[in-house]
Each structure stands twice: as C-alpha cells, then as structure tokens.
Image (tube, rainbow, N blue to C red):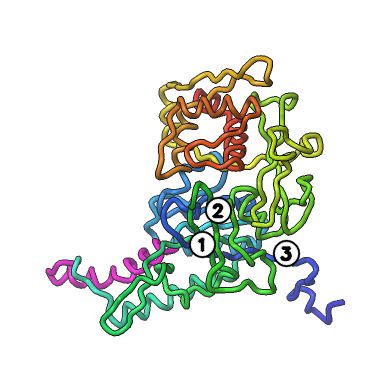
Amino acid sequence: MAVGGLGSLFQDSRAMEPKIKALIYGPPGSGKTLAGLTLPPPLYVFDTEGGSEYYADKGFMVFPRPVRDWGKVIQALQLIQQDGGHSVKSVLIDSISTLHDLLMQDCLEPARKRLSDGGRDPKTARMGDAEWGIFKNQWAGLMTLLTNLPCHLVVTAHEKDNYAVSGTNKTKAGVRPVLDLSSLYFPDVIFYSERRNGKFYLTPKYKPDRGGRFPLDRPIENLLQPSFFEVLSGSGSGSGSGSGGQGKSGATSVTVAPNNTRSNTSVVSSPSLTNGGSSSYNNHQNTPANANANANSPTVEPVAVDSKLVERRNATGETASTKVGGDSGSGGSTSEISELQIRGINRLLPLKKVTEAQLADWVREVSNGRVTSLEGLNQAEGVALISRLNSLNIQRAAQQ
C-alpha cells in the first residue's frame, strides 16, 4: 500500500513492461530498416532517408518527409513521451546519423545568417565554440528524450571504417557507427547488421544488455523469422519439435498458402534464428512435419512493396502480372505474381536481380512442395517470401 499521496507518484513494478531500446548500425541493404519495422504496432517512424517507403504495406505512421525541421522532430518525440505508451507502442528512427547532421546544420544557421548579412558566402560557415555548445546541449536533450520514451525504440546508424594506427602505419581494424558511442547512452544493446549468403545477421556489439534479458550469446541469424522484436522479447523462439512452443532453440513455423485458401495451406518448418536450431523436416524430405499442429502458425513478412509504383497504378489502372500454374495432381495452384512483387523481391536482393520467369519457376516449385533456392535465398527465406507474396494480394491493391 502506498504511503500518503505517494500512490499518485509511483507505479507498481509488477505493472511495468520492459521496453526494448536498441541501436543497429551497418551497411546499406543489411536489414536495419526492416528489423526496426518488426516492432509491435502502433509503430511511429522517423524516416530521414526514405527507406521505409519500400515497406509501406506493413502499416505504420511516418513523420512527414523530407525531415528538415529539428524543432518539429523534438516536438513529435515529446508528444510520444507524453502519450505514456498508450497510443504509441514503438518508435523507429532511421537513421540517427541523418538527425545528427540535421542538428549540426540547424546549429550553423545563425552563423550562416551573420555571414550573409555581412555580404559573405554563408556556405563558408563553420562550427565555433558557441555553435558546438548549442549542439551538445541539444544532442544531450535528444538522448534524454529517447531514454525516457515509454515505448520500444530502435535507432539505426550508418557505419564507417575503424582504423588502427601504429607509428606511420594505418590499417583497417573493422567498422563502427559514424557517431561516437559515448554520446548514445539510450540503448540497452547495440547490433551490427550485415547480409551474408542470402541471410540477414544481427551481431551484438559493445554493450551487454541490462539484466541479461536478450539472447545475445550469438549472432541473430535470419532476423526475419521470426521478427527482430520477437527474438529480443523472447516470444519468437520455437521448440525443438517445431510445434511453436517456447525455447532457446528450435524451429519456427511459417505458413505457405499457394492460392490464399486455408484448405490448401501447407506448413513448412524453417531453421531457428539460433545456431542450435533444428528443422522439422523428416529425414530432410520434402514432406513437412507437424502440419496439423502448425496450421495456425504466423505468417512472416519479409517482402517489400514499392509504394510509388502502387500510387502510379492507382492513378492509371495499369496492371502487370504473370500466371503461374502448378501441376494439376501434385497440389499446385495458380498464383498471380505482379511487377510490384518482383520489385519488392529485388529490394531484398540488393546485389542481384530476379526476373519474372525465375520467380514464376520458383513459385511453381514451392507450390508443388519442392522448395528450392532462388538467387541466394535459402529455404527459410524462400518459404517466408512465398507466404508473404500470397498474403499481400498486391494485384487487388494495385487495381483499386
């Protein structure tokens, strides 16, 4: 029982929900944005680089672009803080490197004005002691604001080469975030993101999480299955049998529905995110195990949508698709693969291109139970991809 009037000032710890506060840095195309977009909704996104528009189908709130007004960014974050976690469950800032540059330009504006008023070129303005003082105060205010947000938070950052200097020799010693980590004191954990052999990886770096809440003893492999948020919150790890139970390692099931009907739904077990995971395939055959037990397993969402093309299609009524027919006695069915989906898949494969013919052949293989790879996608990514293709129903959205 609270003493006196303290009940209105303090909160029962049993009602507190741990919030994820993470920083992800890495090269372009390594899954930083996509990982952040797996946070639970309602999700509010500060997209300073336009990366989220490729995933518009996921459904989230976006701060108006281009992001040029530092004051409005702070105002929006203050409103989220005042919300108390009721209407806003998650925030993604993509990226904080760009916000850092935005603040620096904002702090330079008075110096530019002085130069312009004096008849000199404002482009020659530089950060002096006064400007740096303002910058540090504003940046510290942002860090305090992010630390106190009552919701989940993922912040992305660019990477830069890290060099080791010995005498006159300078050798590359890895990569690090562009920003000084000592100025980023909000995250519980920091990840390095990369893409290797068709998989996304998040490797814990620099800072152990507080209280050992997150499974950070090894890199998170293939972060799309299940989502980055599910892994960190402990709700995305499957049991060793692939039945969808909880556990440190095991299989996670995804649903493949070739014709968008439950009656023809088959379940394929994908590898776990951890290295200790196992597949539910019986002796590595093409017949999935535990199909009935996993009939209600969640559909993962790794495929992007080109929102600009959707807008153009909406305006013109233009359509483009190819019919993919499966073999009639082998469980195949007809699927429509649109140009939107092709472009979304290409977003997942930044170094390669997928042709419509390749995708059509691959869809037929999946529909008939013969899961194969496509341009670097492994089996798990492939199953997730086809699942998402079926659930998007892009053709209908493009023609509306």
| Rendering coords of residue 295 (x, y %) | 77, 35
Query: Label 1 sits on what residue type?
Result: Ile
Where's residue 6, x and y in %? Answer: 78, 79
Task: Describe residue 356's horizontal placement relative to residue 209 as left or right.
Answer: left
- Say which residue label 3 marks: 17
Mark 2 = which residue? Answer: 35
Please provide the residue range marked out in magenta.
Answer: 96-122
Q: Check if residue 263 falls in the magenta segment.
A: no
Residue 356 as seen in the image, left or right of residue 223: left
- Determine crowd level at label 2: few under 14, some 14-19, many 20+ residues with C-alpha closer than 10 A: many
Q: Position of residue 190 (x, y in %)?
A: 54, 67
Q: Is residue 314 visible?
A: no
How far apart in space, not on screen, are marks 1 and 3 (Cα)?
A: 22 Å
Q: Is mark 3 on a helix, strand or loop?
A: loop
> Disc 2 on helix, strand or loop?
helix
Q: Earlier in the sequence, mark 1 or mark 2?
A: 1
Q: Which secondary structure, mark 1?
A: strand
Q: Position of residue 216 (x, y in %)?
A: 63, 66
Determine contact: label 1, label 2, CB under 8 Å. yes
